[in-house]
Image (cartoon, rainbow, N blue to C red):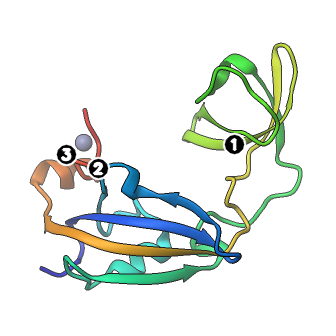
Amino acid sequence: MEITKDKVVQFHYSVRDTDGNEIENSRRGEPMAYLHGHQNMLSGLEKAMEGRVAGDIFSVTLAPEEAYGKRVENAEQRVPVKHLQGAKKWRPGMVAQVHTEQGVRQVQVVKVGKFMVTVDTNHPLAGKTVTFDVEVIDVRDATSEERDHGHAHGVGGHHH
Ligand code: ZN
C-alpha cells in the first residue's frame, strides 16, 4: 500500500545536522505515526513520504524552510518559570516546552532568574539544514474517525 492522502503511516527516523551529529532517534521508543496529507508533518518530510511503502528506507535532507523554519532574530521572551515544562531545574541551553495559544512549543532557555526565565522562542533546530533517515514501518487506511480529527490514533499517534 502506497503512502497517499488519508493513509496512516508509522515510521522510525533519526535526524542529524550537517555535521553528522544525531539530534533525535525514534528507535528509543515507539515509531512515530501520522495522518498523511494533513500537514501534520514537516512539509519536506511529508513530500518525501509520498508514494513510499512499508519497508522503504530512505534519507532526505531538508533546508530550514522545509523543516523547522528560519531563525527569527530578537525572539527572546521572559516567561514565568512555572510555565516551563520538561525539567525541575533549568539551566541556559536546555530545551523547555511552553503552552501557548498556538499549542505546545519548544523553546530554548537563555537566562534563569528566580521567578522569570528568558527563553528563545525559535525552535532549537530553526535555521538548520537537517537530514532524516527514515524507515517506513506500516501504512494503512485511516479510520473515518481519524479523518474527522485530522490526525492518527493508536501507537505513535494521538491518545484521547
Ligand atoms: Zn483524535
From the viewer's perspective, tell me whether residue 44 is left or right of residue 66: left
Q: Hey, what amino acid is under mark 3?
A: Gly
x and y percentages locating residue 12 in the rendered image: 34, 64
Q: Hey, what amino acid is under mark 1?
A: Val
The numbered mark at residue 132 is none
First-in-chain label (3 vs 1):
1
Give the quadrant of the C terminus. Answer: top left
Instruction: From the image, tell me which residue sits under label 2.
Output: 156
Q: SS at mark 1?
A: strand
Using the numbered discs, state the Cα–Cα distance from disc 1 to disc 2 in whole angstroms. 23 Å
Q: Hey, what amino acid is under mark 2?
A: Gly
Residue 118 quadrant: top right
From the viewer's perspective, tell me whether residue 99 is left or right of residue 90: left
Residues at circles 2 and 3 in contact by the CB criterion of under 8 Å: yes
x and y percentages locating residue 44 in the rendered image: 49, 77
Instruction: From the image, tell me which residue sits under label 1.
Output: 107
Q: Residue at x 75, y 19 (%)?
A: 80
116 vs 125: above or below: above
Q: Residue at x 53, y 58 (%)?
A: 24
Q: Residues within 10 Å of mark 3 (few under 14, many from 20)?
A: few
Instruction: From the image, tell me which residue sits under label 3.
Output: 154
